[in-house]
Image (tube, rainbow, N blue to C red):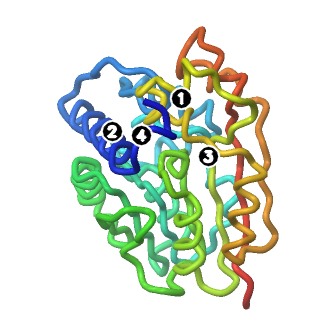
Amino acid sequence: MDTKSASSTDIKTMVRARYGSIAVADSAGCCAPASSCCAPTTPTDAAAKARVMGYSDADLAAIPAGANLGLGCGNPQAIATMQPGETVIDLGSGAGFDCFLAARAVGPSGHVIGVDMTHEMLAKARANAASIGAGNVEFRLGELEHLPVADNTADVILSNCVINLVPDKRQVFQEAFRVLKPGGRLAISDVVNTAPLSADLRGDAELICGCVVGAAPAEQIEAWLATCGFTQIQVTVKPESRDLIASWAPGRGVEDCVASAFIAARKPGA
């Protein structure tokens, strides 16, 4: 089943099941076998992966235990330039890792909203928030194509290796444009397609919900963002992500076809 033969419902069902199983496995203190970017990890492995993605030891020390599941392909915080008092939305917030770091950046006068479609991840994120009394963070159930957020809410939108999993990526960017305030900005880490995938890779269900098959070319992402109304668009491919990507499916050459990238853009306005 590749992305051309799989329906949007099929893909969402696979992704929801995959991430739900990761949240449950981590909560139970175990690791279900899996490959790719969204494989369950031990706390030690998760910390090592986060460091490779660009998070610091200070970042890891600042979040509640269980928030870092070793997921993602980069560190969107590095390009977000968040300021005290800002409102931040994290698309595909998982167990809350980036939300808790954002909450520290925007301070008690700011607000962070995590959106995720997976009930198990939401339960985990909310428990993590409660464990540290994070009063400026909330987590909402929703799909990224239909954000449960009012127009003109956010100063910043974050996301880490999630939009590639959504079948209708243009609609995600349209929703991001809607909920950003005028002058608001995107700060996204995601994977982009850099070369055609073989039929073997395209047909691998693990890679469909594993941040490989759904990656779009940088040029397509730029076009979608422009069509939605964004300006100051930058998609910066990170060649240094090659080893990280290779670890998702060792020996299969996925690192020759996808790479991590920073995606930045701004909604015109103030």
The picture quadrant where one finds residue 114 is bottom left
Closer to us: mark 2 or mark 3?
A: 2
Q: Earlier in the sequence, mark 4 or mark 2?
A: 4
Q: Residue at x 26, y 58 (%)?
A: 126
Is residue 45 toward the left or the right of residue 130 in the image? Answer: right
Q: Earlier in the sequence, mark 3 or mark 4?
A: 4
The Cα atoms of the two marked residues, 4 and 2, are separated by 10 Å
Contact between marks 2 and 1 (CB within 8 A): the answer is no
| Residue type, mark 1 in image | Lys
Q: Residue furthest left?
A: 28
Contact between marks 4 and 2 (CB within 8 A): the answer is yes
Q: Residue at x 54, y 45 (%)?
A: 161
* Crowding at mark 1 (Cα within 10 Å: few <14, some 14-19, many 20+): many
Q: Residue beneath label 3, please?
A: 190
Contact between marks 4 and 1 (CB within 8 A): the answer is no
Q: Earlier in the sequence, mark 2 or mark 1?
A: 2
Q: Residue beneath label 1, please?
A: 49
Residue 69: x and y, percent?
40, 36
Q: Which mark is residue 14?
A: 2
The Cα atoms of the two marked residues, 2 and 3, are separated by 19 Å
| Residue type, mark 4 in image | Ala
The picture quadrant where one finds residue 133 is bottom left
Q: Earlier in the sequence, mark 2 or mark 3?
A: 2
Q: Residue beneath label 4, please?
A: 6
Q: Which mark is residue 136?
A: none
Q: Residue at x 61, y 41 (%)?
A: 215
Q: Residue at x 47, y 43 (%)?
A: 61
The Cα atoms of the two marked residues, 4 and 1, are separated by 30 Å
* Crowding at mark 2 (Cα within 10 Å: few <14, some 14-19, many 20+): some
Tell me if I can see residue 85 in this picture: no
Closer to us: mark 2 or mark 1?
A: 2
In which quadrant will I find the C terminus?
Answer: bottom right
